[in-house]
Image: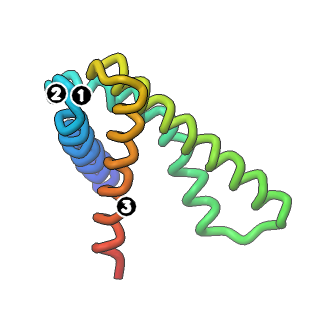
Amino acid sequence: LYGICTIIGVLLGLCLVYWAGAKAFGGVGGFGFILDLIGVSAVPFWLLAPLLNYFLQFEFSQATRILLVIAIAGSFIWSFILLRQSLIFGQGLSVGRATLALGAMWIFSLSAVYLFLP
């Protein structure tokens, strides 16, 4: 139950950050529609989360480590592409504005996570 509540909280937080970024760069907003776009864009995170957990929790050979880093980077790039495409088609932003909005969202998110790390 705790994991489900965590996922719901993370998705709602991601939706709020996405909504703020889309509105700031001229998107149409619409929270229900954004929730649908985030649901589609979250597919790579289903691969990224277990791989990242495996990478952090276990010790393994250098070759396996390289393969995991490649898989994690691929999931990260895939998520970037899906989120940018959702900003382009779902919010009506240009490619440049969508890339800037996504960069601003990631900078905000990373700085917020950095504040709460011990």
Q: What residue type is labelled 2?
A: Gly
Which numbered disc, 2 or 1, marks the residue that appears first in the sequence? Answer: 2
Residue at image location 29% in from the left, 73% down from the top: 116
Residue at image location 83% in from the left, 66% down from the top: 61
- Position in image of residue 62 (x %, y %): 83, 66
Q: Is residue 83 above or below residue 12?
A: above
Q: Which residue lies furthest to the front in this view?
A: 96
CA–CA distance between discs 3 and 1?
21 Å
What numbered label is drawn on residue 110? Answer: 3
Which numbered disc, 2 or 3, marks the residue that appears first in the sequence? Answer: 2
Q: What residue type is labelled 3?
A: Leu
Q: In this view, does 67 lie above or below 38?
A: below
Q: Nearer the viewer, mark 2 or mark 1?
A: 2
Q: Residue furthest bottom?
A: 118
Residue topped by disc 1: 34
Q: Is residue 43 above or below residue 21?
A: above
Dot 1 falls on a residue whose secondary structure is: helix
Pointer 2 with pointer 1, Cβ within 8 A: yes
Residue at image location 69% in from the left, 55% down from the top: 69
Neighbours of disc 1 within 10 Å: few (<14), some (14-19), many (20+): many
